[in-house]
Image (cartoon, rainbow, N blue to C red):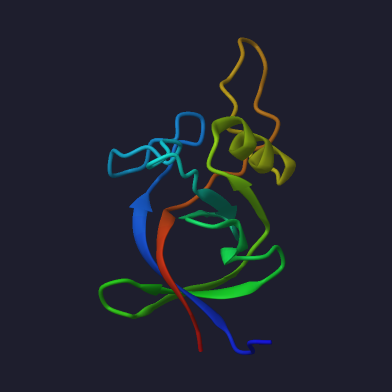
Amino acid sequence: MVTGTKTAIVLAIGMVKPHTGETGHGWNMYNSVAGHTGFVTLTDGFLMYHSNADDFTVGEDIVLRGNDSGRKLKSTRVRAQAPAEREAVLKMLLDNGYDYYPTRAFRPKRFKKKLSTSYSVKGITIE
């Protein structure tokens, strides 16, 4: 059993639009690469895009560090995880108090919470 704090080496990908998958840098997190579907993890107010389902577990505390500088960006807790597929991500967000489904005429959003800048995980270490 590995002990220590899990650290994710990340790059900021800007504000993600969960209903389309578009990131702040113009690429789409719902596009699979060579048939591989990534995963999206919800933490304390932001999303992390990563490669494998077993990278993180729900309830786990992690530290985020910048890919280029190694500087600590923040500490957070994993809240939920879903495959990087539109319906799975929208359902995960709704189940956790974020309503990113397209709006309907004359109906308010169910929740007001909004996501902040999201991250793409480039590596994981144990400190």
- The one nearer the camera, 45 or 93, is 93
Residue 111 position in % (x across, y down): 68, 36
Left or right of residue 83, residue 31 in this image:
left
Residue 62 occupies quadrant: bottom right
Residue 65 occupies quadrant: bottom left
Residue 47 position in % (x across, y down): 52, 53
Residue 23 position in % (x across, y down): 37, 42
Quadrant for the N terminus, please.
Answer: bottom right
Residue at the image position 60 percent from the left and 59 percent from the top: 43
Residue 84 position in % (x across, y down): 53, 42
Left or right of residue 63, residue 33 in this image:
left
Count of all numbered marks drawn on residues in the image: 0
Q: Is residue 13 above or below residue 22?
A: below
Left or right of residue 105, residue 32 in this image:
left
Residue placed farthest to the front in the image?
A: 34
Left or right of residue 113, residue 124 in this image:
left
Q: Is residue 112 above or below residue 50?
A: above
Q: Is residue 90 above or below residue 71?
A: above
Residue at the image position 52 percent from the left and 54 percent from the top: 46
Residue at the image position 56 percent from the left and 65 percent from the top: 55
Residue placed farthest to the top in the image?
A: 105
